[in-house]
Image (cartoon, rainbow, N blue to C red):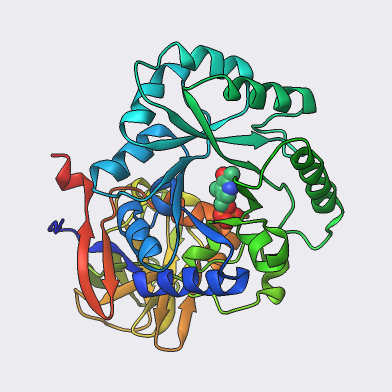
Amino acid sequence: MQQEFYRDTWVDIDLDAISHNVKSMKEHVGKNVKVIAVVKANAYGHGSVQVAKTAIKSGASMLAVAFLDEAIALRNSGIEAPILILGATRASAIQLAIKYDITLTVFSLDWLVEASQYIQEGTVKIHVKLDTGMSRLGVREEKSLLAIFDYVKTSSCFHIEGIYTHFATADEKDVTYFNEQYEKFDEFLELIPHDELLVHCGNSATGLRFPEKVYNAVRLGISMYGLTPSLEIKDELPYTLKEAFSLKTKLVNVKKVPKGTKVSYGATYEAKSEEWIGTIPIGYADGWIRALRDVDVLVAGQRAPLVGRICMDQCMIKLPYELPIGETVTLIGRQNNEKISVDEIASHLNTINYEITCMISMRVPRIFWENGQKISVDNPIINNL
Ligand SMILES: *Cc1c(COP(=O)(O)O)cnc(C)c1O
């Protein structure tokens, strides 16, 4: 759907980069391994519907989201590919999973028994989740796994389509704990018939580093977006990742201020000489949080510092020289030979790249680009008015 927007702050999403990243992983793991494109959290802030469509076009076989609402949103946008919910689902919502043909993650016999009472008709597809060391979701004991398989054999309500686990340290150089989890998963698998099942254990880091260890599917999240799973393994990436996300705005006010002029709330910044100060319409309500006050932006192909406190909807930058209103300012992305990466912003906040793209809020429209063409705009603010 084409939606207009009127603010001068937006995210560009390069769908060709997404496509490159999906195809590269597919080639890397080989044709017998399926790619499950992880599009939870609005595709890590990139826009779940467009990313899902591009991922499927590029060879992904299945989508994964965190919870039922995200899955239904994809179905309501016309997406027909299989969808797996990675999180827990309320037993009482099971009929919706059947109605929308959504695959659920299951990890307890009690849940199956309870959910079966809510099924009026149909069968729900499930993947059984094993906890091999993450201690988040999953079956922890052999007898519980066997009980689930025994129960499902006698029930027409459930069809086991897959079995999986999740690694806690796949993105770390030290593989000791990873190997322990891997062996535990293997031991679990020996207990049950799994030739017909989708068997998966790998996130991006596992797929990138150990393509021979992902069984028959890989859950591709962060590296589909062109971002490294961790800085620690950046030097062992087997192919080039292309970043899909850039954050841009425009100068909406430009002024020359004399030495000693204070800028923004608290008057914490003071011009050291005569300076050109620009105002940009992005602030903490857009996810450009106050802790980012010391980052640079790119303007006219150069780095320029943010000055003073970040406000809710706006902040100020020190320009290298007088620039016109309407000049593009890049907060994440490239201008000429300069680049501000998602990793650079993450390191300012002492966090991981995953958190940065997720935190740019729904107030910021996403523009989707394919083959150099703008193909659609996602702007939930106007959509919801
Ligand atoms: C989010 C998630 C993934 C994707 O992980 P990346 O590191 O982003 O590739 C895979 N599996 C599960 C269970 C997840 O929750």
On screen, residue 117 above or below 354: above
Q: Is residue 65 above or below residue 154?
A: below
Write the residue at 72% across / 23% down: 144
Quadrant occupied by the C terminus: top left
Q: Quadrant of the N terminus?
A: bottom left
Q: Locate residue 37, reporting x and y percent.
A: 47, 56
**Which quarter of the figure has residue 248?**
bottom left
In the rendered image, is residue 258 in sight? no
Residue 332 falls in image quadrant: bottom left
- Quarter assignment of residue 101: top left
Q: Is residue 275 left or right of residue 353?
A: left
Q: Position of residue 54 (x, y in %)?
A: 35, 64
Residue at 42% across, 16% down: 92
Q: Nearer the viewer, residue 310 or 232?
A: 232
Up/down of 64 relative to 378, above or below: above
Residue pictured at 30% horizontal, 40% vertical: 73
Residue 314, how many percent across, how many down?
30, 55
Q: Nearer the viewer, residue 119 or 182?
A: 119
Question: Residue drawn at (45%, 11%), measured in percent from left and top?
Answer: 117
Total marks in image: 0
Q: Position of residue 23 (x, y in %)?
A: 48, 72
Q: Is residue 223 above or below residue 131?
A: below
For the residue pair 288 and 48, the one nearer the viewer reads as 48
Say if residue 174 shows up in the picture.
Answer: yes
**Side of 72 where 297 appears, left or right:** right
